[in-house]
Image (cartoon, rainbow, N blue to C red):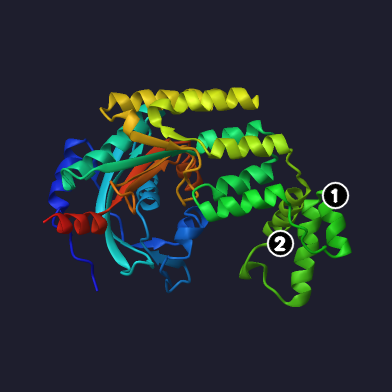
Amino acid sequence: MTARYPEIAPAIQALFAERGAGTVDVPVIQPADPFLDMAGEDLRRRIFLTESETGEVLCLRPEFTIPVCLGHIFSQSGTPRRYAYLGEVFRQRREGGNEFFQAGIEDLGDADRARADARSLADAHALLALTLPGQPLAITLGDQTIFEAVLAALGLPRGWRMRLARAFGSADMLKAALTDLANPPKNGALPEAESALVAAGDLEGLAAHIAAGMAESGLSPSAGRTPEEIARRLVEKSELRSVRLSAEAFAALETFLAINVPLDRAADALERFAASAGLSLGTALAGFSARVEAIAGQGLEAQKIRYDAAFGRPLDYYTGLVFEISAGDGERPLAGGGRYDRLLTLLGAQKPIPGVGFSVWLDRIEALRGEAR
């Protein structure tokens, strides 16, 4: 059953035009691989997959950011450029209903990241203020760049930094990762030959050994993970098990993740944390402070925005700012967004293109509008 077209759509489209974002059409059928590779575990398990006559794996559009970015790359358009969208997305949802409408803006190519971040947050807030007049709104903001800077300053090896960065945005995954970091799991021993190759860090030899074993068992390398991927994962697991973070460093990480303050006090809180832990957050903190100033320049009151150091969003492509805006009770987000500076390069852009954007859940907005009548 097709979701009902939102009655507030014309007002939203007028707002997009007023804010200088051109509306684009995005095909409902999309190549599945970009979503499976980059969208995050939470979204991956809710995608509706299908297959073309030629065997290409396709899906019903589960979100708009990746398709809008692919369209920008294909069109070879210049930047900066702002794209708006309004249409259905298709996901398996816990609260029921597999088709619902989203609207949003993707802001591509603005080299002034603080300005673009602040504008994206202001765009989302303006849309909600238009469609829910008088409704108190709660804004929560996090920062993947700050989180990763803390991990690096604590001296965590690359494997652990990658695992924790992937967990950022999922409270359960982050909790599990921190538990493993405090008490690394003792997994079962590998067979002697593989153990020796892992210990030597011989990725090429390990991949060849795994490929030979797969061939002997009649398994096709294209049936799942490749031998190279399996080899990298085995080495990464070994590195993760070997790390013992000092009690002081682990306490510093927990102290950082507990920071939850109004945005106008966040830069000071981060500076105090860094000084007490003996860490340098360098350019990450400078970028954070510039964004706070830019947000105030958009007319948003920083003292009414929360900065939560442990807050992230469950999409793998975010690299910096992440935010959600909820109704006053904070029960469910009405809008969410963030920065994704690596995404367009991963999707095939010839040069890096900075990007930031947001989407709003129009069914949740309409439900609140109905309650207010």
Q: Residue at x 52, y 27 (%)?
A: 270
Q: Nearer the viewer, residue 338 or 86?
A: 338
Q: Amino acid at mark 1?
A: Ala
Q: Residue at x 61, y 38 (%)?
A: 253
Looking at the image, is 69 positioned above or below residue 249?
A: below
Q: Are marks 2 and 1 in contact (CB under 8 Å)?
A: no
Looking at the image, is 147 positioned above or below residue 327?
A: above
Find residue 133 and report its horizontal and vertical position in percent.
15, 44
Location of the C terminus by quadrant is bottom left
Instruction: Return the residue at label 2.
Output: 227
Quadrant of the image occupied by residue 97: bottom left
Instruction: Return the residue at label 1.
Output: 200
- Badge 1 marks a residue whose secondary structure is helix
Q: Nearer the viewer, residue 36 or 306?
A: 306
Looking at the image, is 334 positioned above or below residue 33?
A: above
Residue 310 marker? none
In this rendering, position of residue 345 left or right of residue 17: right
Q: Residue at x 35, y 47 (%)?
A: 336
> How much space separates mark 2 and mark 1, taking CA atoms?
17 Å
Location of the N terminus by quadrant is bottom left
Q: Residue at x 53, y 39 (%)?
A: 258
Residue mark closest to the camera, 2 vs 1: 1
Q: Nearer the viewer, residue 364 or 19?
A: 364
Q: Amino acid at mark 2?
A: Pro
Q: Earlier in the sequence, mark 2 or mark 1?
A: 1
In this rendering, position of residue 135 left or right of residue 204: left
The residue lying furthest to the left in this view is: 373
The residue lying furthest to the bottom in this view is: 218
Label 2: few (<14), some or many (≥20) within 10 Å? Answer: many
